[in-house]
Amino acid sequence: MRVADLAHGRSGDKGDTCNVGLVAWDDEGYRTLCRELTEERVAAHFGSLVKGSVTRHEMPGIRALNFVLTGALDGGGTLSLRSDHLGKVMYAWLLRMEIAGDR
């Protein structure tokens, strides 16, 4: 299954840092995301696009995970030549990640 089967998301930028948020559709999906989306797995999924750290923040009250990706936007909006220099579609890349699911 893919992350998109369990959640929706949104992302954006603050300079060279990208913020990726995922919100699970239900409690079971949130538990699966917490188990499967470790900082290490998310970093590996993005590969060389993220030059810095990946930090995960859990928000169980709203069934959400927030990932802060440093060094992820090739310098940020005014410096980068990437097509997504503001990180607006980084969430879509994460939604495509294959994970093991209970469903």
Image (tube, grey):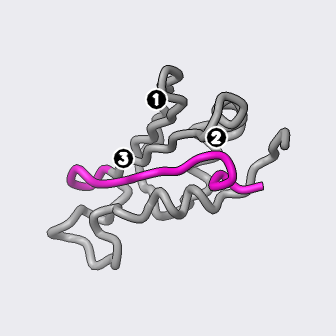
Tell me how far mark 3 sits from mark 2, CA to CA: 15 Å
Foreground of the two, 3 or 43: 3
Give the magenta-colored segment's residue range.
Answer: 1-17
CB within 8 Å, label 1 to label 3? no
Q: Residues within 10 Å of mark 1 (few under 14, many from 20)?
A: few
Residue assigned mark 2 = 37
Residue ID at (50%, 26%): 58
Residue type at numbered disc 2: Leu
Residue type at numbered disc 3: Asn
Query: Relative to 60, does residue 33 appear above or below in the rendering?
Result: below
Q: Is residue 13 magenta?
A: yes
Residue type at numbered disc 1: His
Residue ID at (33%, 76%): 82
Q: Secondary structure at mark 2?
A: loop
Query: Relative to 39, does residue 45 appear above or below in the rendering?
Result: below
Residue ID at (45%, 56%): 50
Residue assigned mark 3 = 19
- Number of the label disc, if any, that sits on residue 57: 1
Rendered location of residue 69, percent (x, y): 41, 47
Q: Quadrant of the N terminus?
A: bottom right
Foreground of the two, 50 or 38: 38
